[in-house]
Image (spheres, rainbow, N blue to C red):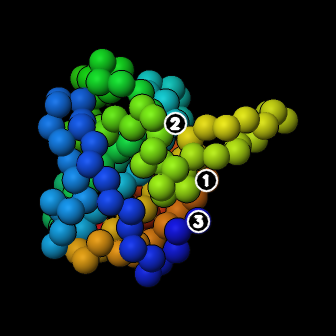
Amino acid sequence: MLDAGDKAPDFSLEDHTGKTWSLADLRSQKVVLFFYPTDDTPGCTAEACDFRDSLAPFQKAGYVVLGVSPQGRDSHEKFSQKYSLNFPLLIDEDHAIAEAYDAWGEKKNYGKTYIGLKRSTFVIDEDGSIAEARYNVKAKGHVARLREALGV
């Protein structure tokens, strides 16, 4: 698991519009990188809409918000349009970036154990270091708690 002070794993991923986003290109900016399991499910929708509704305060504080999940472009585009999401949804179909951030692995749900994406959020500072790592967050209320912790 990543901790505050660790170097954030670099990534280069396309979003639902075809634009490529790279952590190296975001140096000198603060980034909120959140991993969510699946487009258009109740928990993921609640979390994405919370980020949507809080985007202005994050931007005012100098943050770029990026969502990441293993779905493809069509799924991300439909999800983004359906809920008027105002931030990029990055495509990590092979979950390589989720694995690099330790956001992919064993999960337990309703007594079943399986491998999948762990809802996690990382705050990355201007020099590419992890400022905050939050694993296995609850979808509802997560964005409000993050805003409070960051003073946003």
For label 3, the SS is loop
Where residue 19 sits, quadrant-wise, is top left
Q: Is residue 20 visible?
A: yes
Horizontal relation, residue 125 to residue 138: left or right:
left
**Residue at horizontal 36%, vertical 55%?**
33
> On residue 136, which mark appears?
1
Horizontal relation, residue 62 to residue 66: left or right:
left
Tag in front: 2 or 3 = 3
Cα–Cα gap, marks 1 and 3:
11 Å
Tag in front: 1 or 3 = 3
| First along the sequence among labels 2 and 3 | 3
Q: Position of residue 38 (x, y in %)?
A: 49, 30
Placement of the N terminus among the 4 image quadrants: bottom right
Q: Residues within 10 Å of mark 1 (few under 14, many from 20)?
A: some
Q: Residues within 10 Å of mark 2 (few under 14, many from 20)?
A: some
> On residue 37, which mark appears?
2
For label 2, the SS is loop
Q: Vertically, is 51 above or below 42?
A: below
Q: Residues within 10 Å of mark 3 (few under 14, many from 20)?
A: few
**Badge 3 is on which residue?**
1
Q: Is residue 45 visible?
A: no
**Residue type indicated by callout 2:** Pro
| First along the sequence among labels 2 and 1 | 2
Q: Position of residue 62 (x, y in %)?
A: 18, 67
Horizontal relation, residue 109 to residue 150: left or right:
right
**Residue type indicated by callout 1:** Asn
Camera-nearest residue between 24 and 144: 24
**Residue type indicated by callout 3:** Met
Q: Position of residue 71 (x, y in %)?
A: 41, 27
**Residue at horizontal 70%, vertical 43%?**
107
Camera-nearest residue between 91 and 148: 91
